[in-house]
Image (spheres, helix red, strand yellow):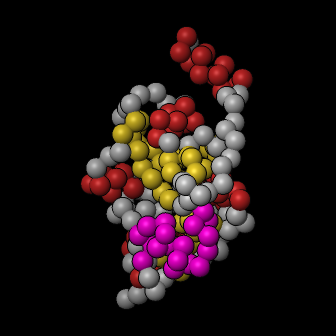
Amino acid sequence: MGLLDKTTVKKVRTALTDAGLEDTVVELADTARSAEDAAASVGCELGAIVKSLVFQIDQRMVMALVAGDHRCVPENLGRVLDLDGPVRRPQASEVKGVTGFTIGGIPPIGLVHPLPVAIDRSLKRFDAVYAAAGHPHCVFKTSVDDLKRLTGGIVSWNISQPEEGASAAPPLPSSKTFTENRESRKTG
């Protein structure tokens, strides 16, 4: 049995086809456990790799999809996802329990439990991006627009910062609507 037939990888393949997209999952000769490994294996820029990172805000698990050449700014996730509370990185067992996948191969789709998702706006620099597909040797090719549609994610400049040597993007100011909605829930 090849890696493309593993149960975890099949979940991703099914999520793609159920959404009306092409099954673009590929098995890599080398590992894609880290963004650097994935970029080398795929033959793309580091920034075109999507890191699927799971955090906990208060009691709610969330996912951040961040460009490979950026690092997540966890303290901004609550604001982007309109959640309050302390932010922490959960244990590997908690991540597997909520996603159904092991760290190093967590995809943004096909999760056991749907999660609120924040998507790094800097990924839009690329026509195609590559995300983990349920195993450290499997990825799938997609677009940021399709990631947004598949995950229901919120695209934001504010969830990441460029790693040294990566190009920076200007932060976006809070929208008036965001501020009004948040204030009305607090008072309502």
Q: Is 99 situated left or right of 72 in this image?
A: left
Magenta stretch mostly in which secondary structure? helix
Residue at image coords 41%, 28%: 85
Q: Outermost residue toward the front?
A: 165
Q: Is residue 113 above or below residue 83?
A: below
Residue at image coords 55%, 10%: 187
Q: Is 107 situated left or right of 185 in this image?
A: left
Magenta stretch: give its range.
31-48
Q: Residue 94 appears at what percent x and percent y?
A: 30, 50
Q: Residue 145 appears at what percent x and percent y?
A: 70, 57
Q: Is residue 110 magenta?
A: no
Q: Nearer the viewer, residue 90 or 97?
A: 90
Q: Would you say residue 179 is visible in this rendering?
A: yes
Q: Is residue 44 magenta?
A: yes
Q: Nearer the viewer, residue 44 or 96?
A: 44
Q: Would you say residue 11 is visible in this rendering?
A: no
Q: Residue 54 appears at what percent x and percent y?
A: 42, 50
Q: Is 125 situated left or right of 188 in this image?
A: right
Q: Is 127 situated left or right of 54 in this image?
A: right
Residue at image coords 45%, 44%: 62
Number of marks in the rendered image = 0
Q: Residue 103 appears at what percent x and percent y?
A: 36, 61
Q: Outermost residue toward the bottom?
A: 1
Q: Is residue 128 above or below residue 4?
A: above
Screen quadrant of the C terminus:
top right
Residue at image coords 72%, 66%: 127
Screen quadrant of the N terminus:
bottom left
